Amino acid sequence: MRSPNLFLTTRRSESWTVFRRPPSKSWHSKNLTSWEEIMYLRNGTQTTANTGAARSRGITRRKLIQGGGTAVAATALLSSFPAPWLRAAQPVKIGYVSPQTGPLAPFAEADNFIVGAARELFKKQNLPIEIIVKDSQTNSNRAAEVAADLILRDKVSLMVVGAAPETDNPVADQCELNEVPCVSTVSPWQPWFFARGGKPDKPFKWTYHYFWGLEDAIGIILDMWSQPQLQTNHVVGAAFANDPDGNAWGDSEHGLPPALAKHGYKLVHPPHFQTLTDNFSAQISAFKQAGAEIITGNMIPPDFTTFWTQARQQGLRPKICTITKALLFPSSVESVGQTANNLSTEVWWSPTFPFKSSLSGQSASQLAEAYTRTTGKQWTQPIGFVHSLFEVAADIIKRSADAQDPAANLDALIKTNLQTIVGPIAWEKGPVKNVAKTPLVSGQWRLASGGRFKYELIIVANGLAPQIPLGGKMELLA
């Protein structure tokens, strides 16, 4: 009777090296001529490095053979090695959920590139990490379902997610419920924390988040709008979706309304619209009637295309238009043609950010160039943050006392202090226990004077993150 391969491990240079017995060898005692026969290096050469250690625990070749069966032999041998060696024989499973299809698919556009690169890096660095990817389909119920599958069926030891509250929140909720550590990003921290029922005095245990907050976004928006070369009547029309992001932005206590009032702006704030609506006439009419010269909002890419097209058709001509979320992506900008010139948005990552990857050593510029070279596509902001998720995950696994144990991974997660391609990440000084903040600036899309892509994103305000260089000054819409 043959037995499955026996996997053993030893630790060298802080990474796990796997030893295994080739499948061609039999477990029959007549073929087991020495201890060395069941310990092979990857290149097929034998090793006796642990023979003495095993014997010191009272297990000899004679006892092993006298065990009389493969199960006894395996048990006897395995019991001679420290538990961490045995646990590390299986790869550590990390779950990753993103909206690869549906209206928020642009957030996952670079997934194949980033995940593929992460797998190669883990392999080169001898990190026994398996990434299991699931598609949320831009559906919160689906996101919760696949997260539960990753936890209960695939037995992941760590979850990572980064694609707006529609995906982040249900995945995090499943992790909190099932006691699996989760690292999330690409959502302002308020919609992630408060919309899930978090309270500063009652934080979450298993779920942690890094990104900027609404206070930062409002700060960089005002930084743009207040530049001296811009002259407006300070009347702002706001179009927010009826979703966690939009409701957080429009919140009367913690969102945009009180901040604008404090700085002398008049806000026109019609009822929040349903996502994927095909009619923005009510919002456009309200903005025109109030004479709004500044338009802002938070919406998904298809909604912006509909809104901006109808606004132009109905004669709405603001001097400034700043839209968060939708205008992160070149595809959204290009969808409205020449009228996109000087549209503005938040910038949470770009090739000009002065940070490097702890995993690959690449600069932000090098990572963006690698993406374009590999895919032929223009860089997008999620590239940096999705890459950073795997930086954080690798760092957690390396420092964990037992990477197969969610509780040990949680302990390592909480102690994270890492320089990443999106900046430093540490949960010691966040606005609440579960949140770490990353730098934020703002930019404008400009028609490119040359090159392979139609538009380029220029950073025009960096008051909250002066370490990130400016590329120009804010300009009014044509």
Image: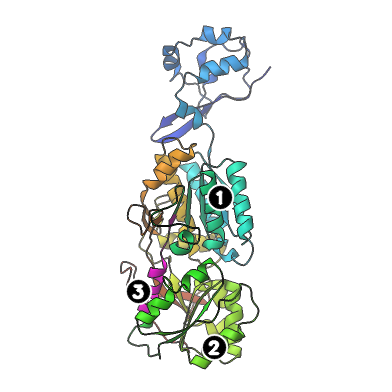
Q: Main secondary structure of the magenta part?
A: helix
In space, the residues marked 2 and 1 are separated at their CA atoms by 40 Å
Judge depth for marks 1 and 3 and give the one in front: 1
* Magenta-drawn stretch contains 215: yes
Magenta region, residue range:
209-223
- Left or right: residue 359 versus residue 153 is left
Q: Three-letter amino acid code at disc 2?
A: Ala
Q: Three-letter amino acid code at disc 1?
A: Gln
Which residue sits at x=38%, y=60%? 437
**Crowding at label 2, few (<14), some or many (≥20) Cα neighbours within 10 Å?**
some
Mark 1 and 3 residues: CB-CB less than 8 Å, in contact?
Answer: no
Q: Helix, strand or loop at disc 1?
A: helix
Which residue sits at x=47%, y=32%? 17
Residue that numbered label 3 is attached to: 470
Residue 174: numbered disc: 1
Q: Helix, strand or loop at disc 3?
A: loop
Mark 2 and 3 residues: CB-CB less than 8 Å, in contact?
Answer: no
Residue that numbered label 2 is attached to: 286
Q: Quadrant of the image for the N terminus?
A: top right
